[in-house]
Amino acid sequence: PLIPADLVGTGNIEKVVTTVVPDTSTGYALWLNNEVENSGIPEEELEAHLEQFPDETIQVPDLAVFYISFRMTKAPFDDPQVRRAFGAAFDSATYVNEVRQGQGLPMKHFAPPGIFGAPPIDEVGVGYDPDFAREQLAAAGYPDCEGFPQVTLLGYSGQSTLNWIEFAQGQWEENLGCSADLIQIEQQPFSELLAATAGSTPDEEAPHMWTLGWGPDYADENNWVGDVLWCGNPDNRQKRECNEIDEKIVAAREETDPAVRIELYREIEEAFFGPEGEYPFFPIFLRIAFVAEHSWLDRIPALFGGDQWYTWNIDQEAQDR
């Protein structure tokens, strides 16, 4: 009732309740019991769900890009060659196709298609290149991972994240020779992971690597490289030191010529994720997730910026049946 008349929209919902759950399986159980309108689908349930509920499934490309990040001041990841090696040894295409069952697009740089200033998806960044990865690790002094210390990879809680970090562990063993016991994997609730990886957390208490993702607040590259990776951000999780990349980030932010901005952002993405890139993290995939959604709900999913609840409609008679 407090929404201005010109923003009321076409929806018929008076109150929206968002249920926060510890993992996808919990939310999906609520959906199966008709207690919520939509839910994510656990990876282990996806095949059966698509067969049983083909008319109550949508796929949403929400522009969220997921990555594995490094604490750049914590050895051995204080060496960019090591960071490049670990990034280039991860087969994103296989991960998306086999582990995520096709729910995404492999990414070699940070900002995805649809974001102003994002380079074309296949033109910037190293991506998966196991030969390059082995060369980088050897150049860092760890040929075939000999002498490499034990490191930690922290993921947030949930089976899908466990699948992700176990896949990473296997990739580094297969492509770099780093045995699984060298990559200690752990999981924590998301809020605890954010605290453990905060820039203010001392290196000795922070993990070497962690899982994270970013979805846009507005459709511009500054919201990606600027708001996530710029060294001047209040919470510099990777503990990046300022350099010429950051000067370009500021220049691109302040530039008024769109063509100049596009070229600057291409150079910035290459400086982060190219063959000589800094690699504060390595992008893995753009999420295009299947969503379980009851047929009594009529809505247009928002790709970013928040759901437009005021356009949602529920067919109460259909729901009651």
Image: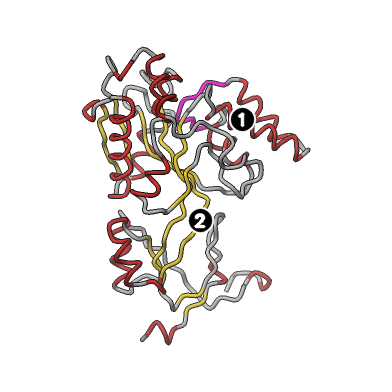
Question: In the image shown, does 284 or 128 lie closer to the viewer?
Answer: 128
Q: Main secondary structure of the magenta part?
A: loop
Is 95 contained in the magenta span? no
Image height check: is 219 above or below 146?
Answer: below
Query: Secondary structure under badge 1?
Result: helix
Residue position marked by numbered label 2 in the rendering: 61
x, y (%) of residue 157?
A: 30, 46
x, y (%) of residue 32?
A: 30, 71
**Residue range corresponding to the magenta coloring:** 234-242
Q: How many residues crowd mark 1 within 10 Å: few (<14), some (14–19), many (20+)?
A: many
x, y (%) of residue 168?
A: 33, 36
Of label 1 and label 2, which has the lower sequence position? 2
Q: How is the image coloured?
A: secondary structure
User: Which residue is rendered at x = 64% and y = 29% of the image?
Assistant: 267
Image quarter of residue 187: top left
Say whether residue 86 is left or right of residue 254: left
Of the 4 image quadrants, the one containing the N terminus is bottom right
Question: In the image shown, does 309 or 182 lie closer to the viewer?
Answer: 182
User: Which residue is rendered at x = 42% and y = 85% of the image?
Assistant: 318
Say whether residue 101 is left or right of residue 177: right
Distance Cα–Cα, label 1 vs label 2 = 25 Å
Specify the amino acid type for callout 1.
Ile
Specify the amino acid type for callout 2.
Pro
Image quarter of residue 31: bottom left
Residue position marked by numbered label 1 in the rendering: 268
Query: Secondary structure under badge 2?
Result: strand
Q: How many residues crowd mark 2 within 10 Å: few (<14), some (14–19), many (20+)?
A: some
x, y (%) of residue 122?
A: 56, 40
Is 240 contained in the magenta span? yes
Of the 4 image quadrants, the one containing the C terminus is bottom left
Say whether residue 237 is left or right of residue 101: right
